[in-house]
Amino acid sequence: MSGAEALARLQAEFAAALVAEGDSGFASRLAGERALALRRLAIYRRAVEANRGGALRSAYPVVARLVGEAFFGEAARRFARDCPPDDADLNRYGPGFPAFLAAYPHASELPWLGDVARLEWAWHEALMAADSPGLDFGALARVGEAGQPRVRFRFHAAVRLVRSAWPVLAIWEANQPGRDGTPDREEGADDVLVWREDERVRAALLAPPEADFVARLMEGASLGEAAEDGWDFSAALGRLAAGGMLAGFSAGTPVPS
Amino acid sequence: MPARHPARAPDPGRAGIGLRTPHFEALAARRPALSFLEVHSENYFADGGPALAWLERFRADYAVSLHGVGLSLGSADPLDRRHLARLARLAARIEPALVSEHLCWSSVGGTHLGELLPLPYTQEALDHVCARVAEVQECLGRRILVENVAAYVRFASSTIPEGEFVAEVARRTGCGVLLDLNNAWVNAANHGTDARDLLRAIDPASVGEIHLAGHEVTPDGLVDTHGAPVSPEVWTLFAEAVGRLGPVPTLVEWDTDIPALDVLLAEAGRADAILARAQGPGRAVA
């Protein structure tokens, strides 16, 4: 066995010992007294679990508060077993946690939990997304009314639209620090626009036609395609522009007459 | 690329502190005199947003040290080019005075453990980690510092004393050493060795930074938590180290149970006093 292979094997065995259910036999690779070596290995085992759980807790603080410490810890352990971090930057760990929670049998009494988690991940991503210089309003004005339906927007990288059948924004707001956890609405469905403005992430509820319009624009539809049945999009577009959510546009090419 | 920030180097006669989110506001308002601010590089790997904006503002007033926890220099896995590219991007943006990584590993087969795991101190591991340090320095176009880590276990296969291993990495690659005295103390206490052996093995000229931090005493040994004041034993070790090395940019690290800024500044002040004595007239000139 080459030196590189020996190192690879030692590391693979060490890593396996840190997640193994029982005694992995790895203590035989360690110097010193066996019982102490096993207890020392357990320090690493707890640290790995704490680091992964901590990364999830910081991305999903509302979920953590909703389900409590023990439940969250167990969910995080099971999630890490299925989906261990594949990125060395733990701030990026856990995009799959909402889907895991949505399918988690122990959370079946909280059917909205996965959607609350989706909102939290959108918030988390919005915090880290690229900055953007903002829309050139002068250039947009020069497109003129006739060209407007062909305009397609590029969104600021922080913008997310989270659509849920549940009152996720009310639940999220009720579980912010200083709130007692009681949502001020029991009814959904919530369509939540998440964006970053002045270095802060913000969230707002959209009415269904506005959410449909924004969703279509985000998918790359032109203004003409996004505003079905002549729906007046000026207020919706104004909100996107005022929040710095539009980063650029293309005016398209006029259809030859 | 033209410099975007004023050139700033750490003052070796003063201590710096770890820059942590709970202190942003207080630090920005007070701007205390500090040698430098150190951040965990990965916490600023975002594409944009408020954390990076804060760091850019602090960089205007302070020298910054980028201290990585995820590059996994010692992994048998291929070097993580994505991670390295993010570090290079951050370094280009922040123009740090110091860039450091740990002499450890944390990934296997592309799965990340998020923990600084010790290497076996063997010739093979030494060859491997030296090649990786050289690769990182080549990519970043600069010298890095490598830190001795806390190790709760030792491998039966290790043949080289830790201090010699660390010293040899610096000698072969030209990298500097980030001498973590708390880790040295934790390892000595946990394995019944002498922390001073590590100090003696390392070429004083290679030491580019010193770390001080607190640990926790548990029934299973000392654990490097960075969640307590620097222990009396580590202060003693620090005084001895600066007596031998002269003044070196020194960092007080505090990462868990983060206290009020004043507590951290008081620890830094205590380090300042020891560094000042090392610069005083009593110091022997080599």
Image (cartoon, coloured by chain):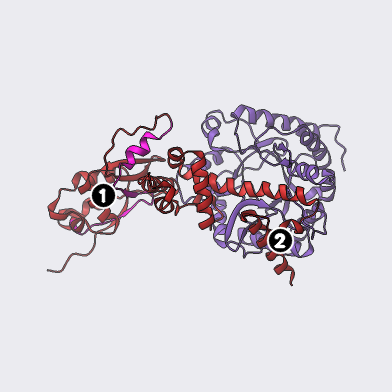
Closer to the camera, B217 or B61?
Answer: B217
Quarter location, residue A151: bottom left
Range of the magenta residues? A149-177
Q: Which chain is purple?
A: B
Q: Which residue is mark 2?
A: B129
Q: Colour of chain A?
A: red
Which secondary structure lies at badge 1?
helix
Judging depth in this view, the residue of A95 and A131 nearest the camera is A95
Task: Give the image location of residue A14, x and y in percent.
Answer: 68, 58
Q: B96 or A114: nearer the eye? A: A114
Quarter of the image where the N terminus of chain B is located = bottom right
Total numbered circles: 2
Going by the numbered disc 1, the residue's amino acid type is Gly
Residue B213 appearing in the image: yes
On whether residue A176 falls in the magenta region, the answer is yes
State the mark number for residue B154. none
From the image, state whether disc 1 or disc 2 is nearer to you.
2
Residue bearing the label numbered 1: A138
User: Label 2 marks which chain's residue?
Assistant: B
Identify the residue at horizontal 26%, vertical 51% (top origin): A214
Distance CA(mark 1)–CA(mark 2): 55 Å
Report which quarter residue A198 is drawn in.
top left
Counting from the top left corner in percent of width and height, residue A233 is at 18, 48
Residue A139 lies left or right of residue B165; in this view the side is left
At x 52%, y 44%, the residue is A73
